[in-house]
Image (cartoon, rainbow, N blue to C red):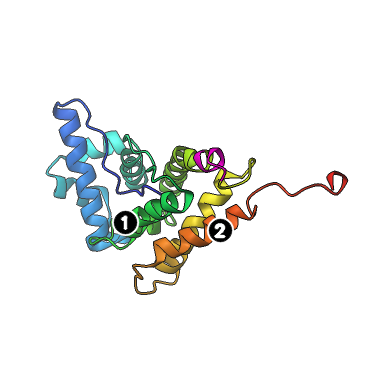
Amino acid sequence: MPSTPTATPARRPGGRTARIRAQVLAAVRAQLVEHGYDELTVDAVAARAGVHRTTVYRRWRDVGGLLADVLDEAGDDGWRPPDTGSLEGDLAALNQEVFDALTADPPITAALIAASFRSEEAARALRRFWEDRYTRCEPVVARAVQRGEIPPGTDPRALLIAATAPLYHRLVLLRTPPDPDLPVQAARSTARAATAGAFSPEESPSAR
């Protein structure tokens, strides 16, 4: 979801604690991408970060805690959805961010998504991340309603999921070669469906 778990975190106050956290989380990302979840251990992360293993155990406890903090850090930013002046344009811009993250090298976003299937703590953190991103993107739908592009009562979550789902399905599940036209195509299809009322409450029979 725009943005994705590679979002740049907001700067925190300096100091030794902040430096150690940055070193450790950078080591988690590098170890995960290079060696996969099975070789993501507290000892490997500590060695890679250049900190004592007891420091990592004391603060993060285990691999699940490390992954959760990476995901929580990604959501600690000031990101807001773009305003291009149209629903299709906004969705295309959001989709482009998702596309860029899912096709990035190194593939940290895909690695974190995969890791969330191995760690319940990471899965909970990823759900928190998505929930935050969907909430931040609701203004995209509200603006489209205000402009008269789509009907009042359009469900923001259903619309946003429909817009981004083709990217995750094709790039993460099917692992098809990246198609640079996919972000715009998915945005256009979703905008047209929204205009037709696909994400609006259906009329009850008594209201007809």
In magenta stretch: residue 202: no
Disc 1 on helix, strand or loop?
helix
- Disc 2 marks which amino acid? Arg
Residue under the point 61% across and 45% down: 155
Q: Is residue 98 left or right of residue 155?
A: left
Residue 192 circle label: 2
Q: How many marks?
A: 2
x, y percent for residue 98: 37, 55
Query: Dot 1 corresponds to which residue?
Result: 101
Q: What type is the residue that disc 1 sits on?
A: Ala
Query: Is any atom of residue 111 visible in this view?
Result: no
Q: Residue at x 19, y 25 (%)?
A: 13
> Is 169 situated left or right of 5 in this image?
right
Q: Nearer the viewer, mark 1 or mark 2?
A: 2
Mark 2 closeness class: few <14, some 14–19, many ≥20 residues within 10 Å = some
163 horizontally vs 66: left or right: right
Label 1: few (<14), some or many (≥20) within 10 Å? many
